[in-house]
Amino acid sequence: MNNKHFTYRDIWKISYPIIIGLVAQNIMLVIDTAFLGRVSEITLGAAAIGGVFYLTVVMLATGFSVGTQIMIGRRNGEGRYHAIGNVFDLAQGVLVTMAIVVWVLLHFAAPPLLERIISSPAILEESLVFLNFRKYGLLFGFVVLGFNALYIGNTKTMVLSLSTFVMAFFNIVLDYLLIFGNYGFPEMGIAGAALATNIAELFTFLFYISWAYFNSDYKKFLLFQRFLPDRKLLRTLLNLSVPVMFQYFFSFSAWFVFFLIIEQIGETALAASNITRSIYMVLMIPVWGLSASVNTLVSNTIGRNQHDRVIPLILRVLLAGIVINILLVQVLIFFPDPIIRFYTDSQSLTEATKPLLRVIAFALIAFSAGMILFNGLSGTGKTMLALKLEILSIIFYLLTTLILALGFKAPAHVVWTVEIVYFSVMGLLAFIALKKANWREINI
């Protein structure tokens, strides 16, 4: 990567391993949803509520890892490879601490909270079973996020693809064994799905440790050598990461509230929304990959003191994302039935899901613009500004959801149109910020 600016080939070279990794990860989620859809509609709905609640809390760690990725990307662009190890070791210490805190919160706070906000007793019971098992995967899951930040930040994204295939392989095999009780294993239902993911994260952690040692990355970056925190570096990393942490937390909190509102419409609407969520997240994969790349590419570009290249780079990635998603949504428009039948044999659930797919076909285009522009802004280091813009977008999102669902008693597919509103507002605000904000003067 010694070119004066990043070309489409450079963008693709960094993006496609992330995309491949996300494909593997989302295949895992698709299989989870498809298996649970064959258990019952209640289990499928509980997976939506329990899964999104878990992700909401975990997004604090994901946001911290993104801040770590930005700082590692800046050090990589500056050519200060030994400094990367200091950032990585410090980040892993913080992530382990966060895993302990989040476990305590899930163990003690989740049950009384969910009892107050979930109206269906059956969905509440299944959601709590899922969380009771899933919380034991926090430690290895959080440490894996730190490794993800390392390898995306230094643009060695192929390692991320390999690690995700390891996770997907073990998760899918264990899902088949533990959800249905095949080959003599206990039939655990939704608990089996949670346990399978926990074990898969353990194997992914072991893969990363092995890779770092056998490929001598621990020598190149001086990993695993600093056990006492560097207070100055910690302060800088937290200043960069905390806004991203809360940005991710608020974003998924809004989605959790969205699914709670959908639950008020009915159990079938909730099950249909969970199928839609799974399909939606699969089709988001290319832009998620491009967004992770633009974050790192912007940080590396600024590290090389090429500030004038930043906005053209973001727009180049944006164009690629929009074109890809325009092509992908044709699948939703022309082949909705076979896609939905992969998740369920229920004709009524299939009919309830089809209108939702038409809505997300349009939402994916808005997602392309909003997510890439927003991650480009975060990559400049203006993470506090990004958090403020995220809060504004979420307020607009939730108000629109409440007005449609509770005020107008709109059906689920109409409520889902708020996704279009959310990403459109986010993209517009991020574009204005990139043009107007003083991000060129930030040092991290």
Image (tube, rainbow, N blue to C red):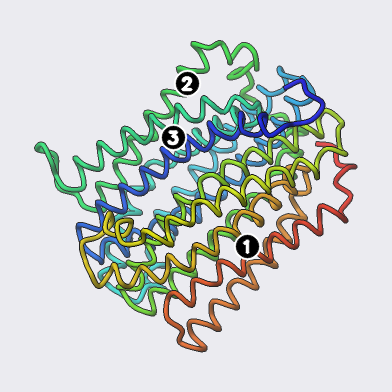
Q: Position of residue 16 (x, y in %)?
A: 55, 33
Judging depth in this view, the residue of 89 and 400 nearest the camera is: 400
Residue at (42%, 40%) from the top-left corner?
A: 25
| Figure check: 64 above or below 249 | above
Crowding near the residue tagged with mark 3, few <14, some 14–19, many ≥20 C-alpha atoms within 10 Å = many
The amino acid on which the numbered mark 2 sits, given as a three-letter code, is Ile
Q: Splitting the image into 4 quarters, where does residue 12 fall?
A: top right
Q: Position of residue 146 (x, y in %)?
A: 56, 33
Which residue corresponds to mark 1?
Answer: 423
Which residue corresponds to mark 2?
Answer: 209
Tag of residue 33: none
The answer to whether 196 appears left or right of 235 in the picture is: left
Which residue corresponds to mark 3?
Answer: 140
The amino acid on which the numbered mark 3 sits, given as a three-letter code, is Phe
Crowding near the residue tagged with mark 1, few <14, some 14–19, many ≥20 C-alpha atoms within 10 Å = many
Query: Which of marks 2 and 3 precedes in the sequence?
Result: 3
Crowding near the residue tagged with mark 2, few <14, some 14–19, many ≥20 C-alpha atoms within 10 Å = some
